[in-house]
Image (tube, rainbow, N blue to C red):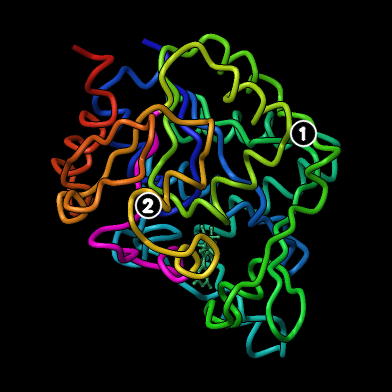
Amino acid sequence: MNVVTLSGGVGGARFVRGVCDVVAPRDVTVVGNVGDDLEVLGMHVSPDLDSILYALADLSDEQRGWGRADESWQALGTVAALGGETWFLLGDRDLGLHLVRTQALHDGEPLSAITARIARKLGVDAVLLPATDDRLRTWISTASGEITFQEWFVARQHRDEVDGLRFEGAADAAPAPGVLAALAAADLILLAPSNPYVSVAPILAVEEIRAAVAARTVPCVAVSPLIGGRAVKGPADRMLARLAGGTSPRHVARCYEGLIDALVVDESDAHDLGGLGDVRPIVARTLMRDADARRRLAEAALGRVLT
Ligand code: FO1
């Protein structure tokens, strides 16, 4: 069974790992968000692709939620001592990946090819594709102006309320090689429990990807990132309240209007399933505390297709 998952970082990466525990990883394609990408200290960082890579290679720092386990920070210490930029934390092990990717990009290799090469080296069998090889960047509108995603998320700890989003470059971005073919060959499309606005929307902002999902002939199942109307981590609940008018399953489903057939919701949200229309609710425990929980959630999302 071919499964395509559209995913952001952290929560999405955990979910993708669960999917790979249930379906043969070779049959799993992950389309990752690149709207969070940034250049820092001269390096191209792709946080969401890296969170997925590290999760699938079993290298993630589970506590921190991003970056590598067993990390050290010597290089960043030198950067700080020399008065360099340290707002975006890059660990020593992580830096190695950014060096390789940045050099390859400078040499003209597309992000998708570099990502595939790094995935192979890390022993990842699933196919990981950036949504696009073109430049696509998420900008956040706040009361104090428009700022880049990472300035809002990391530097300002996402404390500014979001008035709107812009996906720079999306209108001209082409899906990365393999994305449309994977969607065409999919038996099931999944939207990971990532933030609909800043993690999944930048992927769907690539028009041909959105059109392919909209025109699907196979089920598309989204997993809500909310538990009891709250985000496990991050600003998804505040954004849904402000931009969609609430944090119920129907508000999550509305972010994916015309794109999903089912929505996996947490047991704690099962009392409020009104307004879902044609979207079928699948009630499950969605907190991915450990490997078993990850696998159970993946099984719930895959359930109907697997049986
Ligand atoms: N998140 C932070 O909150 N602070 C950081 O300094 C930070 C550094 C970082 C470095 C590499 C990487 O792959 C991810 C990193 N993240 C950091 C996480 C990242 O900014 C976000 O979790 C995602 O962009 C949102 O999905």
Give coordinates of residue 278: x percent, y percent: 38, 29
In which quadrant is the N terminus drawn? top left
Residue at 25% across / 58% down in the picture?
227
Q: Magenta segment, which residues?
A: 221-238
Pick the front one: 117 or 50: 50
In which quadrant is the C terminus drawn? top left
Give coordinates of residue 186: x percent, y percent: 48, 14
Residue at 45% across / 59% down in the picture?
67
Give coordinates of residue 36: x percent, y percent: 63, 57
Q: Quadrant of residue 39?
A: bottom right
Residue at 33% across / 56% down in the picture?
248
Residue 187 lies, with reference to residue 177, above or below; the image says above
In this orientation, does residue 27 appear?
no
Amino acid type assigned to the residue bearing label 1 in the image: Pro
Residue at 28% across / 30% down in the picture?
301
Secondary structure of the residue carrying tag 1 is loop
Q: Is residue 251 magenta?
A: no
Pick the front one: 269 or 116: 269
Assess disc 2: are there few (<14), some (14-19) or many (≥20) residues with their C-alpha within 10 Å of its C-alpha: many
Pick the front one: 24 or 136: 136
In this orientation, does residue 267 appear?
yes
Q: Which residue is mark 2?
A: 11
Side of 264 relative to 195 (left or right): left
Residue 221 lies, with reference to residue 60, above or below; the image says above
Residue 223 lies, with reference to residue 42, above or below; the image says above
Q: Which residue is mark 1?
A: 110
